[in-house]
Image (cartoon, rainbow, N blue to C red):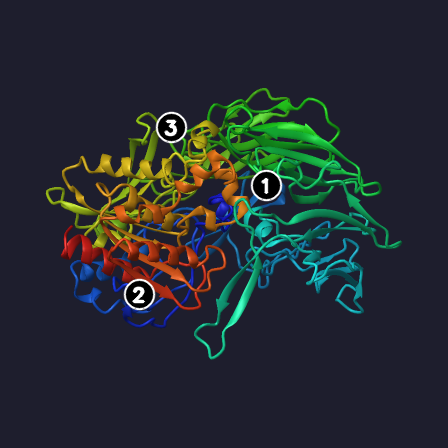
Amino acid sequence: MANGTRDGRLVLGKVAWVDYTGGVGTGFLAGGNAVVSSATGWRVLVLGVLGLGLACGWAGAQDRLKKMPGYAQHEKMAKEIGKAAKLGALSVTWKDDGKGLEYTRDGKKFALDVATLEEKPVAEAKGEGDGKKGRGGRPGGGGRGPERGRQFDRALSPDGKTLALYKDRNVWLAGPKGEEPKQATFSGSESARIKCGTASWVYGEELEQKTAMWWSPDSKKLAYYRFDESKVKDFYLALDQTKLQDRLDVEAYPKPGADNPVVELVVLDVATGKRTFVDVRDGKPFTNDAVGHYVWRVAWSADGKELLFHRTNRLQNILEVVAGDPETGKTRVVLREEWPASWVENNPEQRFLKDGKRFVWASQRTGFNNYYLHSLNGGEPVTLTRHTSEVAGIVAVDEAGGALYYLARTGANPLKLQLHRVKLDGTGDTRLTDPAWHHQVSLAPDFRHFVDIAQTHDQAPITRLVETGGGVKKELASSDLTGFDKLGLKKVELFEYLAGDGKTTLYGLLHRPSNFDPAKKYPLLVSVYAGPETDGARESFVQPSALAEYGFLVASLDSRSAKGRGKRVLDSIYQNLGITEIDDQAAGVKELAKRPYVDGGRVGIFGASYGGFASAMCLARHPEVFHAAAASSSVTDFRNYDTIYTERYLGIPTDEAGKKAYEKTNIMALAPKVQGRLMIFFGTADNNVHPNNSMQLIQALQKAGKSFEVQVGPDVGHAGLNQARMMEFFIENLVVGKP
């Protein structure tokens, strides 16, 4: 459940919609009040924030859906919506140090001479690829990454002569192809629950730590993780339950407030076999307060003289970048971030300059994300940006020209990213794009031009070549909405509303069906994720949701948990999950319900993972607003989840404030108050949000005498409810059987 949807990385809400085409049968759970009906037709889809249309498709519609209102219209339109608009967003490749461009348009490849603006067709070469290799022992080239929550189990030395392997809980060294492996560490042991050369699951899941062995640039030293999980309790998950024999998946899974794995960094001198433990906690014991409770983002300095890493305390409100001496193990602090009110961002942007010493660093130390120029040598940092909005991504550093190019939320609204240039001394900050549009840019290697994809939520993308600091030189592609208009599709509306606090401006998107009639009243469906630092609205062109063709309005709403609004707005969710973001979803619906064509008495909400939690919580906490919910793979009480993610936002459930914060997330306590219709989905093989979350909610609802529905994915992992079955549920409860 790593944070949010940062650059498409899988996190709690980044749900894999997995293929499942079996049925779970029809029957009743104990208590006689939870119907389990047939589940068919999964498709694979990986989502960032849960998509509006849940466009996962299905092998075949549910058996009752075909006879329901809106089905025929949906079937007619769903096949056409995806191909109705011909979008003008191009992916470009710069050539000749910025003197040329290559791109594909309408299925044909073109080359552009930037000086003459002459465009010529190009014959596509076979087997194109760059074949680049990684550095410093990091896997390079293509190929698949490690499984979710895991690390690469091998690392090739920069000189290509030695392969470090993780095997049998220890580090082994072998030839470049894995030949003649020899054991290099010996403390790794299943009985002692120690492992060297890999990380504990929670590190991969929540800190995005995909590596656990790191070669020095000269290939003479290998740094590696050592974890002691002896005090971490295991979680047992039954797998292969649809086969003749099942099996157990056993994972050291630290729950909030319980013991965490003890982390160490060790440096091995390959020639001598000497092992040096890096002093990751400044000689202090492994306690909650120790800055070094968590250690991650490990890498060698460019000159190989130091091992760099991040460390934080258990509450994650102090973050230090640290340099360790590989010979002595002594460490020094390069920089320190603190935010006592809540938490510190644990993976801020960092871009080293060519000297390997200076680096651009993103920090929320002022309450807004800005860039600073730090050095491994210490000294006062240079403040590069001073926004009271937020920076949103480093584009490039022009060291020869002494400038940083970056994106910032300085457009007409905070959803519209703009390209900026600022000098490396912090002066001369200039916006280079039109604030009326949202921009995606590709900057030329010589920094003289950039390719700009400009769009908004209702203005389809256009791709242009722009002179840096000047005007548009050539339009490379524009969108064609002829088919879109011919089908009668309605552009998505971006609207504003006040959050639950009555003062913070938030944004939402509203989708209408192609046959929309403002004289009619429509039921409303809300697609939700709402986890920390994720968005419900955006300013890139949005295709209308096919779900609206069933005869619904479909909305996606921001909460104060949205990214890019400043740290103090985001802090409103600290120790208040299940309250702040839920009240904001209700506020958005209440605003829409003021419109004459929105039926505020027929509102459904759906989501998966954190979105499942939000869906169920909305139904329980705001029965006056929400009347039906489909909750998939839901956390139902954050005491059930892991330490790193949960304690970052809720604290530790051992003090009074922590206990109260966790109780706010307990949906089971609200079971007697549930009034609307609830559909619960979970996969029996979900090793992220465990099935016991849904089981606890099912038990609580049964004890409260509540009727509800359940869909189970046998041997399915972290996934979401079949879309067709979901629409059956919503049409049954919001259209056929109105609340």
| Front residue of 141 and 166 | 166
| SS for dot 1 | loop
Q: Quadrant of residue 298?
A: top right
- Give the x, y percent position of residue 140: 66, 55
Reading the image, the residue beneath label 1 is: 99
Label 2 CA crowd tier, 10 Å (few <14, some 14–19, many 20+): few
- Give the x, y percent position of residue 165: 73, 61
| SS for dot 2 | loop
The answer to whether 246 appears left or right of 500 in the picture is: right
Q: Residue 412 carries which label?
A: 3
Q: Residue 30 carries which label?
A: 2
Q: In which quarter of the image is residue 145?
A: bottom right
> Mark 3 or 2, which is nearer the eye?
2
Q: Which numbered disc, 1 or 2, marks the residue that appears first in the sequence?
A: 2
How far is the residue under mark 1 from the one under mark 3? Answer: 32 Å
Report if the CB atoms under discs 3 and 2 are less than 8 Å apart.
Answer: no
> What residue is shown at x 50% (from left), y 27% (from top)?
368
How far is the residue under mark 3 from the one under mark 2? Answer: 55 Å
> Mark 1 or 3, which is nearer the eye?
3
Q: Which amino acid does label 1 sit on?
A: Lys
- Give the x, y percent position of residue 543: 32, 48
> What residue is shown at x 58% (from left), y 64% (from top)?
126
Label 3 CA crowd tier, 10 Å (few <14, some 14–19, many 20+): some
Q: Eyeballing the image, is 105 above or below 418? A: below
The answer to whether 698 appears left or right of 591 in the picture is: right
Q: In which quarter of the image is residue 351?
A: top right
